[in-house]
Image (spheres, rainbow, N blue to C red):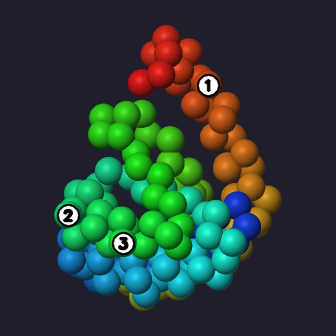
């Protein structure tokens, strides 16, 4: 499993998680990787952090940490049972597609990690910008399907 962060401006770190992500393990990622990324890329404190509703993301310890750092960046709360609109899913699909097209395919976890890091670094900034810029269109499409805000 991997954890990553990105923005319209830049790619953040790609972190290899050796075990299942729990709230406590997620809490060890937030200060070391998310906070430093946000303070560098969004030094104006106007950055917004969006995550899914995975159990570790919604854990009390991670929510508390995000609230304590709300003056550093905003946390965009994603309501439960709402349509998935996180660009991270698109990035994950691009990485998986790239791994599937590697020949020969990675045979060990170390090989897979190497391929993922290489592909992560190869994602062009314009790809990220296109994903971010597509969000208003996706929101409008969902509102049309659901006939109003969800």
In percent of width and height, residue 89 lies at 49, 52
Where residue 55 sits, quadrant-wise, is bottom left
- Tell whether label 3 touches label 2 (CB within 8 Å): no
Residue assigned mark 3: 68
How far is disc 1 from disc 2 in space, using C-alphas? 31 Å
Front position in the image: 62 or 26 = 62
In percent of width and height, residue 68 lies at 36, 72
105 displayed left or right of 80: right
How far is disc 1 from disc 3 in space, using C-alphas? 32 Å
Secondary element type, mark 1 = helix
Mark nearest the camera among 1 and 3 is 3
The mark nearer the N terminus, 1 or 3, is 3
In percent of width and height, residue 27 lies at 29, 77
Query: Does residue 7 lie above or below 136 as drawn?
Result: below
Residue assigned mark 1: 140
Where residue 117 sits, quadrant-wise, is bottom right
Front position in the image: 116 or 32 = 32
Residue assigned mark 2: 60
Residue at 37%, 80% (x, y): give it. 29
Residue at 47%, 52% (x, y): give it. 76
- Tell whether label 2 touches label 1 (CB within 8 Å): no
Mark nearest the camera among 2 and 3 is 3
């Amino acid at each position: 499993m991997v954890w990553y962060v990105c923005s319209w401006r830049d790619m953040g770190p790609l972190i290899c998680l050796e075990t299942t992500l729990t709230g406590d393990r997620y809490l060890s990622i937030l200060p070391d990787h998310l906070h430093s990324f946000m303070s560098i890329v969004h030094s104006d404190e106007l950055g917004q952090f969006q995550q899914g509703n995975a159990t570790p993301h919604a854990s009390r310890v991670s929510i508390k940490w995000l609230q304590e750092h709300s003056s550093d960046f905003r946390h965009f709360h994603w309501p439960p049972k709402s349509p998935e609109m996180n660009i991270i899913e698109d990035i994950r699909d691009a990485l998986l597609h790239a791994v599937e097209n590697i020949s020969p395919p990675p045979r060990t976890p170390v090989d897979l990690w190497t391929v993922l890091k290489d592909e992560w670094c190869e994602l062009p900034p314009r790809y990220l910008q296109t994903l971010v810029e597509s969000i208003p269109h996706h929101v409008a499409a969902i509102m049309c399907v659901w006939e109003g805000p969800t």
